Structures are given as C-alpha cells and as structure tokens.
Amino acid sequence: MKTFAKNFLWGGALAANQCEGAYLEDGKGLEICDLLETGKDRFIKLDPALELHEGRVYPSHEAIDFYHHYKEDIAMFGEMGMKCLRTSIAWSRIFPNGDDAEPNEKGLSYYEDMFRELHRWGIEPVITISHFETPLALVKKYGGWDNRKLVGFFERYCKVLFERYKDQVKYWMTFNEINNTLKLPYLAAGMVVADDVNAPQRQYQAAHNMFVANALAVKACHEMIPGAKIGCMLSLSTAYPNTCRPEDVLLTQQEDQLRNCMSGDVQCKGVYPYYAKRYFERNHIHFDVEPGDEELLRRGTVDFYSFSYYMTNCVTAQKDAAQVSGNIMGGAKNPYLKATEWNWQIDPVGLRYTLNHVYDRYGLPIMITENGMGARDTLQDGRVHDDYRIQYLREHIEQMRLAIDDGVELIGYTPWSAMDLVSVSTGEVEKRYGFIYVDKDNAGSGTLERIRKDSFYWYKNVIATNGSEL
Ligand code: BGP
C-alpha cells in the first residue's frame, strides 16, 4: 500500500489578514479586510464609501496579534514538528497604497525575520501572495481587479517579493481561492459590485485580469527563483448530483465546471475551456483580452494545484429541495452527511473523490492548503478537549492516504488553521479552527494567551509518525 512520502509537507495554515493584527503598524496601509466588522452580515454592513467608523469592532485590526507573537507562535509550530507553514504576506505592508513608488522596508524586513524564524525550526514557508489582501487604496483609486492597472501593480509586488525572499521561500501561491472572484467579489477581487447590473461582466473581467497577473507571477517566479514552485489556490466544494435523475446529473456537471473547474483549467492548462467560452457567449459577457494575453496564459501555467476543502454540496434541478449553506457555497442538503454548527457538511470520503478528480484533470502535484473544522471550543481547567476536531482531521487524513494509494501525487497538507484566528465569513474568533487556542472572544476581549489543545498533541504524533498513527 502506498502512503505519505518521506518528505511530505505536514503543516498548518494561516493568513496575514486573519492573524496578524497591527493593522497600521510599521507603515502598513489599509487592506480590504480591515473594513469588515464582526457578524454574519459583515459584507452587507460594509460601508460603500469604504471608510472606517468609530465605535465599531473590526476584528482584523488586532486579530490574534501574530504580528507581535510570531516568535512564540512559530516555536509552538516547531514543537508540533510542522514541516511547513502556509501563511500570506499582507500586500499593504509592502506597498501600503499598492501603487507606491518604493516598497516599505519595514514590511519587507518583518517577513524576512519571520521566514528566518521558520527556517530556524526547520519549517518551510508556503506563501500566498494575496489572501484576500488587496490594498484598500487600489480599490478606492482604481475600483479593484476589473481595472487592468492592478495587473502591473501585482506583478511589481511579486517581483519585489521574489527578489527579497528568493533564498527563503521555495513554495508560492498567487491568489487565495481565485474562483471566489465570482462569489465574493469584494474579498477575492477587491470590487464593490452591490446591485450593479454589469456585475457578472465586471467580475469576469476581474477574473481575467487575475489570470493574467497569475501567469506573469509564474513567469517571474521561474525566472527569478530557480527550483521554486508556484501554484494556484482554489476553493473546492465538490458537487454531487442530488439524485440520479439525468437533469440533476447534467446540472451538477455544469455547476462543477463553472464553479470549481474554470479557474484551475485556465491556470493549469493555460486556456479558457470550451464550456466557459460558450457560457460567455450565451450570457453576453464580453471582457477585454489584450493582444498577447492568450500566449501569456499558455506559458504561465502553475507547477502545482492547491485547494481548500471543507465540505461538499448536492445539486438539484428541483426547486423546493432542502438547502444547506456554507459561508460561500450552498446547495441541497445531503442526508448522508453530518454538518458543523455553521452548517458545513462534513465529508471525508469526498476529499478522496476530489483529489482523484483534480489529479485526473491536471496530473499536477497537489497540496491541500486548507481543511478543518470550525467549532466553539471550551476551556476546561486550562485544557481544550477537541476530540471532534481530532476525529474530523483523522478521517480526512485517512482519505488522503487512500487517495495516495489510488495514485494521486499529494505533496502537502496544511490544515486550517495552525492556531485560532478571525473567521472570514463571520469575523468571529469563537469559530475556532486551530491546534492552539487563543484567549480572545468575538467582542475583541481576551488576554491573547496561547493554549495547546488536545489536537495539538494528537497532530504532533501524526507528523512524527508520518501519518501512520492517526
Ligand atoms: C476559506 C478562506 C480562509 C478561511 C476558511 C474558513 O474560504 O480561504 O481564509 O477563513 O475559508 O472559513 P471561515 O473563516 O469563514 O470559517
């Protein structure tokens, strides 16, 4: 039986906007997440004028203050034996306005120190270049990613990173969950679309610009850091037909293509797939493609495929089917699956299915860069007994091993999240995912003390035994 390779990258994941805090420190500019309050309605409450308001709670401003605690936090990741840490660079620490003439040296040296610290513990940095972190000034001045100018600003930002960190970072990803440009345009593409009737057109323009930016980043990375690997990152919630009715099966295929496959097809194969072209024609979606873009996309394909996996959903042509909603992806309820308190349907076997589906389509090495269970943990005598999280992770890792035995080339796993942090969909800290508990509540109070959960010790042993003891 095949199992995890000796050099398998066991790790954990974070994102700058969800853990760092220090939102204006050392020259950092505001980024899009800095305007989001706590609550399920955080996107609805967003001020269309993109201003901050006194007296409101913006969880990213302090988050879990990883900015100041990174040495102590990385020491705990080291203690767990992590081989890699996936986190992101906050773009607005490097270019506070996105279009500044020079990068901010304090921001650059902060990450240099952080990467040095990771290497001291034998932890490989796996870096997302933008995890929902477009500088706010770019949104205000240029309107977000549907403006082609952002391609140039992003390319320059990437080149600054590659030059500065070429000896420290060998694994890169361009945009977090790039396919969310269509579902979450503010987060993924820095666009306020509200009730704009041209929203779909603008969102596909943004997606195209981001594909071009991705290809330019791939090209620059290969030229500037020999041996480095750069990947795409998608949000995958695999779609199952709700029944074997041919109408359900067909609709599932169509949803899967547009929702899950299109971005990966462009980033991995370098061309827009036939179904996307037809979709644009049928829906009168016309976006600008500059001369040379097609060639660029063809030549700028990624080295590995990465994705987040939390749930699967069912698709049905039937209008009155019972629904479940994740934060972004919804669908018909699957009676065979249990769900988390936030209604995310837990489906370990679906992970094996998804890994096979992706590997079959692209044949590229795969890294699972997010997977985990949000839960309301409780502290009991200074301990967190999160056996439900252990069970969730155990069952998913078991399916990863089976997928490897199926022949899938899986190179790494960075569960969400290395430690508790701010949730993207609700802004809560109490929707906890980490191996390490952070003493902070949704209202922003707490000592920020870090406490190892039971899952911390369990995962430490998983890594030590290379996945043989679950
Ligand atoms: C993904 C994001 C992450 C993370 C995760 C969990 O979509 O890439 O940033 O937050 O979802 O979601 P949530 O925080 O909404 O629970």
Image (cartoon, grey):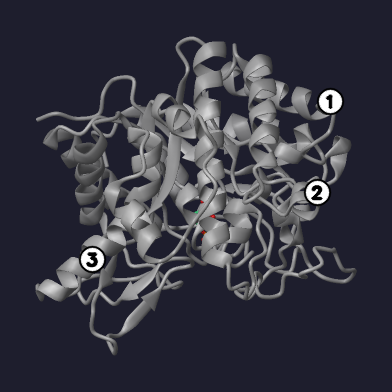
Q: Is residue 279 visible?
A: yes
Residue at the spot x=37%, y=33% of the render?
Answer: 270
Residues under labels 2 and 3: Cα distance? 39 Å
Q: Does the numbered disc 2 mark a residue whose Cβ is under 8 Å from ligand 1?
A: no
Relative horizontal placement of residue 428, taking residue 47 as reference (left or right): left
Q: Quarter of the image containing the N terminus?
A: top left
Badge 3 amino acid:
Thr
Give the number of callouts: 3
Tell me if residue 245 comes above or below residue 10 in the rendering.
below
Q: Secondary structure at mark 2?
A: helix
Q: Quarter of the image containing the C terminus?
A: top left
Disc on the earlier residue, 2 or 3: 2
Image-quadrant location for residue 333: bottom left
Q: Marks 1 and 2: CB-CB under 8 Å?
A: no
Image-quadrant location for residue 461: top left
Q: Secondary structure at mark 3?
A: helix
Q: Position of residue 335 (x, y in %)?
A: 21, 77
Image mark for residue 137: 2
Residue at the spot x=28%, y=44% of the render?
Answer: 397
**Outermost residue toward the bottom in this view:** 320
Q: Which residue is mark 1?
A: 102
Q: Position of residue 135 (x, y in %)?
A: 74, 46
Q: Which residue is mark 3?
A: 252
Relative horizontal placement of residue 140, taking residue 211 as reference (left or right): right
Q: Secondary structure at mark 1?
A: loop
Disc on the earlier residue, 1 or 3: 1
Badge 2 amino acid:
Ala
Disc on the earlier residue, 1 or 2: 1
Residues under labels 1 and 3: Cα distance? 47 Å
**Outermost residue toward the right in this view:** 54
Residue at the spot x=33%, y=67% of the render?
Answer: 345
